[in-house]
Amino acid sequence: MKRIGIVGGGQLARMLALAGRPLGLDFLALDPAVNAPAACVASPIVAAFDDTVALAKLAEASDVVTYEFENLSAQALEGLARIVTVRPGTRSLMISQDRINEKQMFASLGLPTAPYRAVETLADLKTSISVLGCPAILKTRRLGYDGKGQSLIRQEIDADNAWSTVAGCAAKAELILEGFVPFQYEVSQISCRGIDGAIVHYPLSENVHAAGILRRSIPFAEGMNTSLVVQARQAMERLLVELDHVGILCIEFFVVGTDLIVNEMAPRVHNSGHWSIDGGGVSQFENHVRAVVGLPLGNPATVRPVAMINLIGSMPPLSELLQIPGVRVHDYDKESRPDRKVGHLNLLADSPSGLRASIEAVADYLPMDSRDAVLRPSITAW
C-alpha cells in the first residue's frame, strides 16, 4: 500500500484522502490543528507547517508528499524534497506564492495578464495609480486568499486608506497594484498532468465570487465556447510543461469579449473543481492522487448539468437540503465562522431548467451575499 503525505489537513486534504482510499492508498496529514478536517481520514501529525522534525517524520512515513495550499514555507518544502519525492514540485509552489513572479512567468509564456506595478511604499502606490489609473486593486504579493490582503482603489484619494488596509502601519511592504480588467465573467481551467507527461483537462468552469470568496461554479457544457476552451487549454499546457508540474493545476481567467486574461494560478486541487466529485467523471481529487503516485489518469468529462455551491459561515439544515432534487452534501466538519468555507453542495440535474430549479431552492438557505451570487444567470449553456 502506497502512502501519501499531505502538508495541510483542511478540507482539500480530506477530499484527497476520501478519493484515494478506494484505490488502496493510505494518507497522513500534517496540520497544527488537533481537529483538522482531514484527521478522520488521514493519520494526523499535529505540528506547525514549518516544524522540521514533524516534516521529517512525514517524509519518512510517506512514499510521496503533496500539499493542499500555497501558504507554506518553500524553504521547508525544499528541505522535505531532499528526503522524499514532492509532487507538485517546489518550483510550482514558489512561483504561485509571489504574484509578481507569477505574472512574469505568465508573460514569459505569452499569456496576457492585467497591467501591474510593484509597490513598496505609499509613494510608489501613488505613482503607480497615476500610471495604471483607477479603479485598481492593491494586493499583498504573498499570502492572500479569499479576498484577504487586498483593497479596491476606486479613485486616487483612496490610496492612503488602501495602504493602511493592506500594509498596516509598515512604512515599506511587498505589494502589487493591478490595473482593472473590464471582464464579463470569470472562468477557471483545471487540468492534471501525470509523471509520464500525459495531460487531462476538466471542462472550463464559470465562477461567481462575492466579497472575494467563490460562491458558485458551473462547468461548461461540451462543445460550448470552443474558442475560450482552446485558449485555456493551450495556456494550461504551456504552464504544465514549463513547470514540469505533476498533479492538478488550476488557472483562473477573466473573460474579456472573446479573449482570456490570466488572473492567477493554484498548484493544487481547487475549489472551482469540487463539482467533479459528483459530476460523472474522475474527480480532480482522484486524478491528483493518481498523478502523484504514478497511476494512469482518468477521464474527467462530465455528462450532465452540475453546479457547485459553497456553504459559507455555517451549514444549512441537512434535513432541508436533502429534500432538494439532485443535491449532494459535502460537510467539512468545521466550526461555524463568518466568511469560512464550511462545506459545499453539488447539484445534479437532467436538464438546464432542472439545475436552475435546484439552485433556486438551495438559495433560500444561504446568507444574502451568497444568495445573490448563486442566483446570477449562468452562461454555461447546459
Image (cartoon, rainbow, N blue to C red):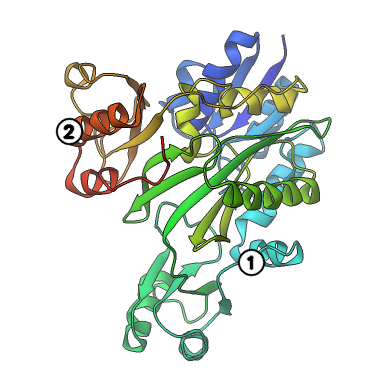
Q: Nearer the viewer, residue 141 or 310?
A: 310
Q: Nearer the viewer, residue 222 or 1?
A: 222
Amino acid type, callout 2: Tyr
Front of the two marks 2 and 1: 1
Q: Which residue is mark 1?
A: 112
**Residue 20 horizontal/vertical position (percent):** 60, 17
| Number of marks drawn | 2
Q: Earlier in the sequence, mark 2 or mark 1?
A: 1
231 displayed left or right of 309: right
Please report the residue visible at 55 percent of the width from the left and 70 percent of the height from the top.
114
Q: Which residue is mark 2?
A: 365
**Residue 330 horizontal/vertical position (percent):** 37, 23
**Residue 68 horizontal/vertical position (percent):** 57, 36
**Residue 166 horizontal/vertical position (percent):** 41, 70
**Secondary structure state at the residue bearing disc 1:** loop
Image height of 39 relative to 382, above or below: above
Image height of 177 relative to 287, above or below: below
Image height of 250 relative to 316, above or below: below
**Secondary structure state at the residue bearing disc 2:** loop
Quadrant location of the C terminus in the rendered image: top left
Regarding residue 75, the answer to whether it shows in the image is no
Find the distance from the CA under tag 2 to the CA under tag 1: 39 Å
22 displayed left or right of 213: right
Q: Residues within 10 Å of mark 1 (few under 14, many from 20)?
A: some
Q: Nearer the viewer, residue 184 or 73?
A: 184
